[in-house]
Amino acid sequence: MATFIVLLGPPGVGKGTQARILADAKKIAHISSGDLFRENIKNQTELGKHARSFIDKGELVPDDVTIGMIRERLSRPDCIPGAILDGFPRTPVQAVALEKMLAEFNGEVSVVPYITAPESVVVGRISGRWTCRLNGHVFHHMFNPPIKAGICDIDGSELYQRKDDEVETVTIRIRVYLEQTIPLVEYYRKSGKLIEINGAQSVEQVSKDLCAAVNI
Ligand code: AMP
């Protein structure tokens, strides 16, 4: 049976960075709902235009759009052995939809690492964050600066600050997280699959703890 890892944690805790490291180590696909939306926005698809109005305000994109987008992604051949899910599910309704989809694809959620950090830490990380236009690689002006300012070390594309990383929008995203995603944490805690990881450490230490938690 294919095994899927759901990464949970507040905005800015480093889920994207850790998901990439883990996907490389486990040699399985990395599915980031935020990256999929940003790709659709960049390509000016109908889905992207619709999603943008929610994303720019820091709100969640409606479930039908989000679940449909993830279903399409999960149906691609690179997900047959499993995948790391980063940013989806974000609500208990999405988690139930995920279980149904995975049952169709002969898979299940095996473990749910929950990366935590105090609000002051995540706000500081988001405000210094620079994202690459081509592939969504993430840098931080203090904790993980690019070799050349404004340029991605990995693919050479331009680095930009996400509009939803502006202070006012971050406050809304954290509120949305507390209201809509914390119930999901409790949902997975009850299922016995949740493993808490201290995200207020270096990238290397978090990824060591994460690899140990998922048995790599
Ligand atoms: P992220 O890159 O995970 O921080 O996601 C950026 C934005 O995309 C979020 O603030 C939401 O507006 C939207 N988004 C990402 N994943 C989801 C999801 N599972 N459900 C609804 N909206 C989402």
Image (cartoon, rainbow, N blue to C red):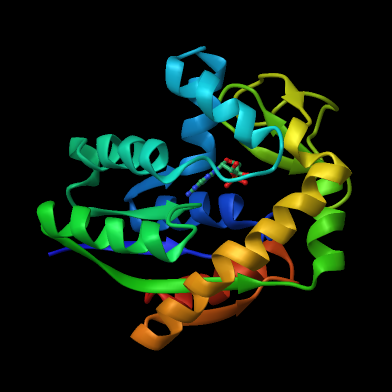
Residue 102 vs residue 187: left or right?
left
In the image, residue 136 lies at what x, y percent?
59, 33
| Nearest the eye: 171 or 216 | 171
| Nearest the eye: 118 or 45 | 45
The residue located at (64%, 61%) in the rendering is 177
Residue lying furthest top? 44
| Nearest the eye: 107 or 166 | 166
The residue located at (53%, 65%) in the rendering is 8
The residue located at (79%, 49%) in the rendering is 170
Compared with 156, 82 (above or below) is: below
Q: Quadrant of ligand 1?
A: top right
Q: Which corner quadrant of the image does residue 15 belong to?
A: bottom right
Q: Is residue 42 visible?
A: yes
In the image, residue 37 lies at what x, y percent?
51, 31
The residue located at (55%, 81%) in the rendering is 196
Residue 201 vs residue 127: left or right?
left
In the image, residue 181 lies at what x, y percent?
56, 65
Compared with 172, 138 (above or below) is: above
